[in-house]
Image (cartoon, grey):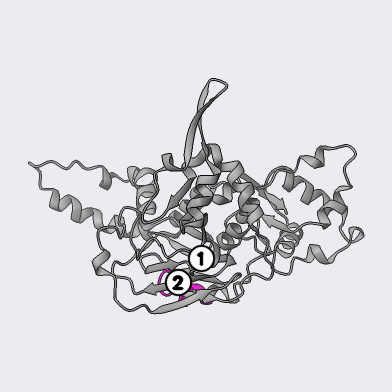
C-alpha cells in the first residue's frame, strides 16, 4: 500500500511531466509518520558514519567545527559535539543527512513509494533547519527529485532549465549566471506536500524565518541510454564481426564506421536486447528492508495474525502486475502461477486488500506464500 497519494495516473505523469515539467501535489501524505524524534534516532545511528552528516551556513561548515576526535578501544573515531551542533542550528544553519533511507525505515518507505511509481532506484537526502535565511543557492540537480515536506514549511522557487538532461558530471556550479531571473513557480510547501523537479531545472529552497522545516529530496536514478550502449558493447557487439575491426591511422576507418552504422541502429532498436538489458539491470538491484527476527521466536504471535497487522510491499523498484509470470527482487527470481500473481498484485496495490481481511480469510496457500516471500526478502511487511 502506498503511503504517498500521487493523485495522478502513472501514464499521465510520464506523458506530461517526466523529465519535462515540474509538478506539485498538495497533501500527498494522508498521515505524518515522521517527527523530530525520528531525526534524533537517525543521528544516533549515523554519528560514527558522519560523512553522511553535513552542516551548511553560508557554505559548508568544516566538520572539525562541530565534531571532536576521540579514541575508543584502540580506534580513533569522531563524535558530534551536541551543544555546538544545536548552536549552529539555532543560528540558522541547515543540517543535511545524506542517504537517510539507509538509517530510517520510515524514510525508506517513502523512497519505495516513489521508486515503484516511476520504476527507478531512489535515494533520500534530508534537510532540517529552524529558521535562518540561508540556502544552497540556485542550482540544478543531475537527477529528478521528489521533494517531500514532512515537518513545518519551506519556500520553493523553480526556474526554467538552461542545460537539458544533465549527466552526473554536468553540474550547475560554473553556470550560476545562466539561471533565469524570474521563477516559473514560487510557492510554500506545507507538511505533506510534494514537489517534482525534473533534472536540469534550476531551483532554490528557502527556510522561512522563525519556522522549523524538515524535508527529504527523493532522487530517482534510471539507467541512461549511455548505460544501454555500454551494456551492448560488453554483451552484444563483440559477437558481431563488424564491431571487431581495427581503427588504425594508416587504414581507411571511414568505411569501417559507415559499414557499422546499420548494425548499431538495428542492435539498439532490437526489443529483445532492450529486454535483456532491463533484466540484467534489475538483477543487480537490491532493496533495503526491515528485519523480522521476531518471527523466529517460538513464543511469538501467530504468523497469520502478525501478517494482518502489516502493509505488504514487493521489494522491487517495479510493482508486481496481475498475471505476472515471474517475480525478480533482491537477487531472487521465482515463478508465479496466476493465482499467486493476482494475490500479490492485489495486496500490494493502493487498496491493499490484505488490510481488509481477517485471519480466517487468508488461505493456507496465501499464508505460506507470504511467509516464504518475506523470509526470502522478496516482500516486506511494514
The mark closer to the camera, 2 or 1, is 2
Q: Is residue 284 visible?
A: no
Q: Which residues are magenta?
A: 12-21
Mark 2 closeness class: few <14, some 14–19, many ≥20 residues within 10 Å: some
Q: Nearer the viewer, residue 102 or 240?
A: 102
User: Percent x, y for residue 245?
Assistant: 22, 43
Q: Disc 2 marks which residue?
A: 156
355 left or right of 101 in image: right
Q: Disc 1 marks which residue?
A: 147
Judge whether 286 appears above or below 2 on screen.
Answer: above
Q: Is residue 7 visible?
A: yes
| Disc 2 from disc 1: Cα separation | 10 Å
Residue at 81% across, 53% down: 307
Residue at 69% across, 68% down: 31
Residue at 52% across, 41% down: 81
Q: Nearer the viewer, residue 216 or 314?
A: 216
User: Percent x, y for residue 151?
Assistant: 60, 65
Q: Helix, strand or loop at disc 2?
A: strand
In contact (CB < 8 Å): disc 2 and disc 1: yes
Q: Quadrant of the N terminus?
A: bottom right
User: Percent x, y for residue 126?
Assistant: 52, 56
What number is the disc on residue 110?
A: none
Q: Nearer the viewer, residue 65 or 248?
A: 65
Q: Helix, strand or loop at disc 1?
A: strand
Q: Nearer the viewer, residue 329 or 33?
A: 33
Q: Quadrant of the C terminus?
A: bottom right
248 left or right of 175 in image: left
Residue 259 in magenta?
no
Judge whether 248 appears above or below 315 on screen.
Answer: above
Badge 2 or badge 1: first in the primary sequence: 1
User: Percent x, y for residue 290?
Assistant: 68, 47
Amino acid at each position: 500500500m502506498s503511503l504517498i497519494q500521487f493523485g495522478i495516473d502513472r501514464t499521465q505523469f510520464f506523458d506530461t511531466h517526466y523529465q519535462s515539467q515540474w509538478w506539485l501535489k498538495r497533501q500527498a501524505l494522508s498521515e505524518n509518520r515522521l517527527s523530530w524524534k525520528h531525526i534524533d534516532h537517525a543521528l544516533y545511528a549515523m554519528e560514527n558514519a558522519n560523512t553522511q552528516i553535513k552542516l551548511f551556513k553560508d557554505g559548508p561548515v568544516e566538520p572539525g567545527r562541530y565534531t571532536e576526535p576521540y579514541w575508543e578501544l584502540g580506534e580513533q573515531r569522531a563524535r558530534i559535539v551536541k551543544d555546538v551542533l544545536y548552536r549552529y542550528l539555532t543560528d540558522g544553519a541547515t543540517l543535511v543527512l545524506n542517504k537517510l533511507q539507509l538509517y530510517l525505515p520510515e524514510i525508506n518507505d517513502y523512497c519505495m513509494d516513489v521508486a515503484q511509481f516511476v520504476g527507478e532506484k531512489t535515494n533520500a537526502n534530508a534537510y532540517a533547519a529552524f529558521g535562518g535565511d540561508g540556502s544552497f543557492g540556485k542550482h540544478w540537480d543531475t537527477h529528478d527529485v521528489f521533494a517531500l515536506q514532512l515537518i513545518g514549511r519551506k519556500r520553493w522557487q523553480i526556474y526554467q532549465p538552461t542545460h537539458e538532461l544533465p549527466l552526473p558530471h554536468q553540474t550547475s556550479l560554473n553556470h550560476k549566471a545562466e539561471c533565469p531571473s524570474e521563477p516559473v513557480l514560487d510557492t510554500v510547501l506545507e507538511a505533506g506536500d510534494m514537489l517534482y523537479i525534473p533534472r536540469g531545472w534550476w531551483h532554490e529552497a528557502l527556510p522561512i524565518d522563525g519556522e522549523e522545516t524538515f524535508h527529504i529530496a527523493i532522487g530517482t536514478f534510471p539507467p541512461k541510454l549511455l548505460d544501454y550502449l555500454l551494456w551492448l558493447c560488453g554483451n552484444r557487439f563483440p559477437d558481431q564481426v563488424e564491431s571487431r575491426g581495427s581503427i588504425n591511422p594508416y587504414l581507411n576507418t571511414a568505411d569501417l564506421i559507415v559499414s557499422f552504422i546499420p548494425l548499431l541502429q538495428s542492435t539498439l532498436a532490437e526489443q529483445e536486447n532492450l529486454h535483456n538489458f532491463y533484466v540484467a539491470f534489475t538483477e543487480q538491484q537490491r532493496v533495503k528492508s526491515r528485519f523480522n527476527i521476531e518471527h523466529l521466536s517460538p513464543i511469538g504471535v501467530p504468523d497469520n495474525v502478525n501478517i494482518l497487522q502489516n502493509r505488504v510491499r514487493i521489494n522491487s523498484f517495479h510493482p508486481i502486475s496481475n498475471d505476472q509470470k515471474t517475480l525478480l527482487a533482491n537477487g531472487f527470481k521465482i515463478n508465479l502461477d496466476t493465482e499467486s500473481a493476482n494475490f500479490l498484485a492485489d495486496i500490494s496495490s493502493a487498496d491493499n486488500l490484505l488490510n481488509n481481511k481477517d485471519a480466517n480469510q487468508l488461505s493456507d496457500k496465501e499464508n505460506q506464500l507470504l511467509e516464504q516471500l518475506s523470509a526470502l526478502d522478496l516482500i516486506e511487511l511494514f
